[in-house]
Amino acid sequence: MDYKTLKITSTQAESILFDLYNIEGEASELPGEVDFNFRIKVANEEGYILKIARPDEDANYLDFQQKLLQFVAVNGDNLIAPKVVLDTVKSPISEITDAYGNKRKVRLLSWVSGRVWSNVNPQLDDLRCSLGEQCGLLTQALLGFDHTEAHREFEWDIAQSLWTMKHLELFSSEERTILSDFQLQFKSYQERYAQLRKSVVHNDANDNNVIVSSDLITPRVKAAIDYGDAVYTQIINDLAITCAYAAMGHKDPLTAILPIVKGYHTTCSLEEEELKYLYTAIAMRLVISVTKSAINKVEEPDNHYLLISEKPAWEVLKKWHTVDSEFAHYSFRDACGFMAHPNQKRFKEWTLENSFKLSGLFPRTVNNKIEPIDLSVSSKWIGHQESFNNLDLFQFKVKQLQKENPNKIIAGGYLEPRPIYTSTNYDKLGNYGMESRSIHLGVDFWLPEQTPINALLDGEVVMAVNDAGAKEYGGLVILKHSIDNFEFYTLYGHLAVAGVLKHKKGDFIREGEQIACLGGTSENGNWVPHLHFQILLSLLDYKMDYPGVTYLNQVSVWKSICPDPNLLFKSDGLNAVNSVSNKDLINYRKQYLGKSLSLQYKEPIKMVRGAGQYLMDQYGRKYLDTINNVAHVGHEHYSVVKAGQEQMALINTNSRYLHENINELAKELIATLPPELNVLHFVNSGSEANELAIRMVRSSTGERDIIASEYGYHGNANMCIDISSYKFDGKGGKGAPEHTHIFPLPDSFRGKYRGVNTGAKYADEVQKQIDIVHEKGRGVGAFIIEPIISCGGQIELPKGFLKETYEKIRKVGGLCISDEVQVGCGRLGKSFWGFQLHNVVPDIITIGKPLGNGHPIAAVACTEEVANKFANGMEYFNTFGGNPVSCAIATEVLRTVKREKLQENALQVGAFLKSELKKLSEEFKIIGDVRGQGLFLGVELVDGAMNPLPAQADYLTSRMKDYGILMSTDGPDYNVLKIKPPIVFTKENAEELLLYLRKIIAEDFMILK
Ligand SMILES: Cc1ncc(COP(=O)(O)O)c(C=O)c1O
């Protein structure tokens, strides 16, 4: 029928509404595949949806629709769903005659307000779980409802989906393979599938049929709308459809749908039998979708609406085809709270009655004791990652351990998160950023090369391969053991390849017979010899490299498929040691540590290892660190660690004894400084450095008055706090002390003076403070400022400001201090020290954070004149300042900056990052300003009226954490993102940071209204 003759205008809809329902409202047209739908807005009400059918619409079908909604309205406690509105003669279905004389059925339903799922960004796990919950609730509400129309032939019903087999010719051969694989799989289990529970279900929870609450931080699914596809079918099909759509657009569709399955199960209990078919049912919905699209492309090439989900459907289908169906099944079981592997319980029960001696596995072993070895990410025994990577050293350490424990076998490792696997080789990009395959699934027995390995119990060889290519195992054997009413497998990795290849698939190895001997390092992907022993309840679909390690988010499934090998041996030494939980750590801190200590993130992280620009938590999750300018040359930089360790092993005393380390460090620092700054004092922290600087001011000038910037921070000691507006003007502060004089934050973006050429204006503000000091009859001691004001929100000093200010201060006899605690040592790229950006030379500079790369060492550099005046006869003694260990460390930090050209790196990567951030600011108006130098950048979030947006900045940092990226905020309004990573930060790291910033800045909460 001609679309033009069917069309109803909004005005016509409004009069139909009035005639039939006596409701006055404003109609606007909505897209629809079958009906002509209008949204009706009515003052002070949620409103309605008016549905005008095509003339040929089946009355029975419409009756089914209305009865279904009426059933839900009665039976659906807690359920929001459109309600049927009766017309003026109390009928749920009315009729009109349109302008062409066609009879058309009309229905009116209540409007469900909220956002359509497809418009919601992001769609996080909690939201997806609530999607499952709502769909489950709806199915639950529909139990017991029936109608003849629900049993119609319907192409969108998964149970009827085999019709798609007739259309394979519409696809490429690659596509055909995927489609027919799923179709044949589905066909093969028709008989069992037909027995599953059935009901009338919604059958179409697609992106446009799901309504989400308008809460932007914790959105929840409110309702499913559009019941036009409801049908009587297997209940599991309803969940499958929800999953099929909600999997679209995710890197890892299986992980994306698990919260939905979990949510569905909480409101509509799924049976274990049903879960067996979910994987294929999901696939078949997608198969229907792409087949429909392909047919429509031929029949109705212009109907855009019908083609809308073709591309994402294909994307998921292709990914889904690579997901192991059995693994998916276990994941669904796990999500529903069933044991992931159906045989897990049986296996455990069997092991209660069957125990094995280690000597059964290792015939040369006389006793069965284990000496545990800790190779976890937090293991002190491993020490630095480099020590782990050094094969000879590692082997030596294992041998030493063996020597110390002659009657024991060195072993361990089940469910251990290992740092070795957190290298990028084991990374994949998941739904929440980079994921590392780091959790070990077997037990490793560290024994010499050629140690014979025997079968613990009779087994059939199902795999005997050289797995060295996959770098996982080298020689690998898997034996199948058939026990009473189930089977399990044992896996032996890192065997000598020649012995392994003597076995063929199907061979039988009896208990006590040799399987093979342990392989040497060269044939085992450069591992120190050891047996990787793992239990498998399923082989899944692996032909070679059966996983020996897994991702953190899959552990609960994998530990069910691969149970603890110690269930066989029951050795005390193999029992996992439980470390203190984060909760206990927090509780202890709360009770016994200072009450004003804070913790980062709502859910604090326990960091156990650092490596370069990364930090790792106890589970082996790697975080990209954009916060830590203390770990200047990279967390736990090997040469810095070594320098400290080596010196610590020799001597650590105070600086009253001669030692070259203090001189060496002084030389390294002096080489970076202008000739005027040629005397050094070493201290332990930035605060101590500023404290000493202020003492120097007093002894040099005899004055106590200090001029400092608004929102500046200079340390936690008494005198430092007294000059830190960030503290005394902040929470708990009591304002500026008598001798401190604060001038306005020289912020050209949102400060007192804005735009270009503000340097002189802010310098005049300093002059005002000088005048105030003089009015009080006193003199100015010093002016202190950071070259980029960090806590103030990464504020770059305006051009000319510092030069002009220094002149004003010096004119009245004051000293100039540059606080380089945050920005020093090459971070700014263009210059080694921050003051050098401004073409000035201070009288004193204070150096802190980066100097020790995490070790507490700091310094004060000053002119000879200042130093001489300070040396007034009173000894300056500092117990720890300048000790040989700290000096060795700081010297190595400075040498590393030079050797690895890290200042140049900060310049290049910083410039790239800043220019990309600027591009981002053009695209997203919420970014008001991008500023900073090198790898010391700030991104300020404001609204259109320049109001700060701290909630958005907080949201952003917490969402970035979800993707494994650590960021912080600061500034007077906490609306500035600070970027100040270790300066080994690479362009790739910057790209990763930008990728997720862009993603999150586009989320609903970040969009300016
Ligand atoms: C600019 C500035 N100066 C001094 C300090 C004090 O250094 P510390 O914490 O090492 O005592 C800090 C610390 O954050 C700082 O940011």
Image (tube, rainbow, N blue to C red):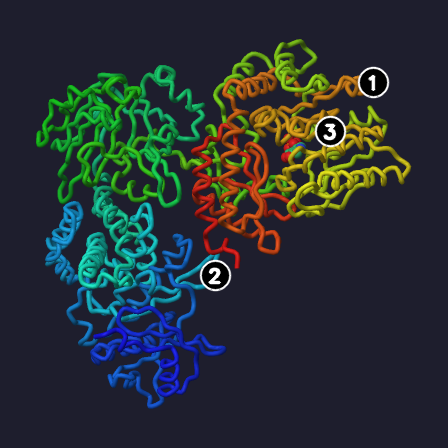
Q: Residue at x 68, y 36 (%)?
A: 799
Q: Which of 367 and 186 lies nearest the eye of the viewer?
A: 186
Examine the rendered structure and indicate whether residue 415 appears above or below residue 9: above
Residue pushed farthest bottom?
A: 89
Q: Is residue 836 left or right of residue 126?
A: right
Examine the rendered structure and indicate whether residue 651 appears above or below residue 714: above
> Between marks 3 and 1, how big is the CA–CA gap?
20 Å
Residue identifier under label 1: 872
Quadrant of the rendered image containing residue 977: top right
> Between marks 2 and 3, how big is the CA–CA gap?
49 Å
* Circle 3 or circle 1, nearest the eye: 3
Please name the amino acid that badge 1 sits on. Asn
Give residue 817's mark. 3
The reply to whether discs 3 and 1 touch (Cβ–Cβ < 8 Å) is no
Quadrant of the rendered image containing residue 855: top right
Examine the rendered structure and indicate whether residue 58 appears above or below residue 295: below
Sequence-first disc among 2 and 3: 2
- Assign a secondary structure to mark 2: loop
Sort mark 3 into few (<14), some (14-19) or many (20+) by Cα contacts within 10 Å. Answer: many
Q: Position of residue 739 (x, y in %)?
A: 82, 38
* Circle 2 or circle 3, nearest the eye: 3
Q: Residue at x 44, y 40 (%)?
A: 964
**Ligand 1 placement by image quarter:** top right
The reply to whether discs 2 and 3 touch (Cβ–Cβ < 8 Å) is no
Residue identifier under label 2: 215
